[in-house]
Amino acid sequence: MSLKVALAKGRLLEPALALFGRIGAAAAGAAATRKLVVPSSDGSLSFLLVKPADVPVYVESGAADLGITGTDVLRETEADVLEPLALGFGACRMVVASPTHVPYPSLPGGVTPRVATKYPRLTRVFFAETGLGVEVITVSGSVEVAPLLGLAHWIVDLVDTGGTLRENGLVERARILDVCAVVIVNRASQKLKLEVHQRLLAKLQEASRKA
Ligand code: PRP
């Protein structure tokens, strides 16, 4: 019985494919191809290559049996899926950042801060918990440009090396969430195909520990 695995195109794709390669289920050429459904070399899996934000959608709906996604996207979507395994790659953090000359946590004159982000839900939750009134502006990428062009005062985005913030004159102001890659599994699929899921997860867990 073959399982459908949703994988995020982008920075998680290469380490995710390497992980499946280590358990003997490589997706030859998946990173280079324009094909969006790629079988594994041993025929046990088929990989669906989708946008990062869509991985939880495919898995929650059952269109994919399982997937690999970041906890950033997972917490943002609040998808109702199982989360059996944290992986040793994709580690980064979600932060509030602003240009050096734009203060945090308040602006002069009591101006309401505008915050640009790809994570509107997590951003609203963070500022509600912090007690700061902000206006959230949702963008879908290159968030760091927003304060440079006056679209927003602050941003909420992921930081890995810190290079993108630095090169755009931004500084980290507050940490919201530690992020890593995780395996997520559709609830019904896990029940219906229990043994297949258990075998695959055991292999992924071992390969992930050894990496
Ligand atoms: C992510 C993130 C930052 C950058 C951080 O973007 O949104 O822009 O990486 O990495 P750094 O701290 O190592 O510079 P990504 O490249 O995934 O593309 P995106 O802007 O389209 O989300």
Image: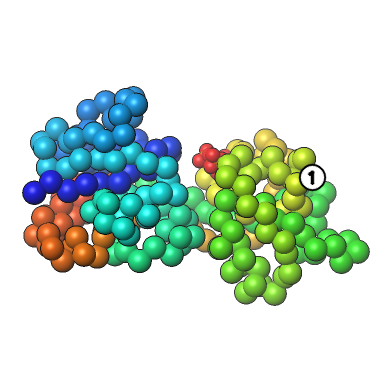
- Tell me which residue sits at (80%, 52%) in the image: 102
Up-down relation of residue 180 to residue 51 (above or below): below
Up-down relation of residue 78 to residue 161 (above or below): below
Secondary structure type for disc 1: loop
- Tell me which residue sits at (74%, 57%) in the image: 114
- Tell me which residue sits at (71%, 44%) in the image: 146
Picture colour scheme: rainbow
- Tell me which residue sits at (65%, 56%) in the image: 96
Up-down relation of residue 145 to residue 192 (above or below): above
Q: Which quadrant holds residue 124?
A: bottom right
**Left or right of residue 1: residue 101:** right
Residue 12 seen in this snapshot: no
Q: Ligand 1 lies in which image quarter? A: top right
Residue 151 seen in this snapshot: yes
Foreground residue among 116 and 86: 116
Question: In the rendered structure, which amino acid carries the disc numbered 1?
Answer: Gly
Residue labelled 1 has its Cβ within 8 Å of some atom of ligand 1: no
Pinpoint residue 24: horizontal percent, then vertical percent: 14, 38
**Left or right of residue 198: residue 169:** right
Q: Which quadrant holds residue 38?
A: top left
Pinpoint residue 27: horizontal percent, then vertical percent: 22, 33
Up-down relation of residue 122 to residue 149 (above or below): below
Foreground residue among 76 and 18: 76
Tell me if mark 1 has few (under 14), some (14-19) or many (20+) residues whose alpha carbon lies within 10 angstroms of its own.
few
Pinpoint residue 70: horizontal percent, then vertical percent: 41, 52
How many numbered circles does the render carry? 1
Say which residue label 1 marks.
150
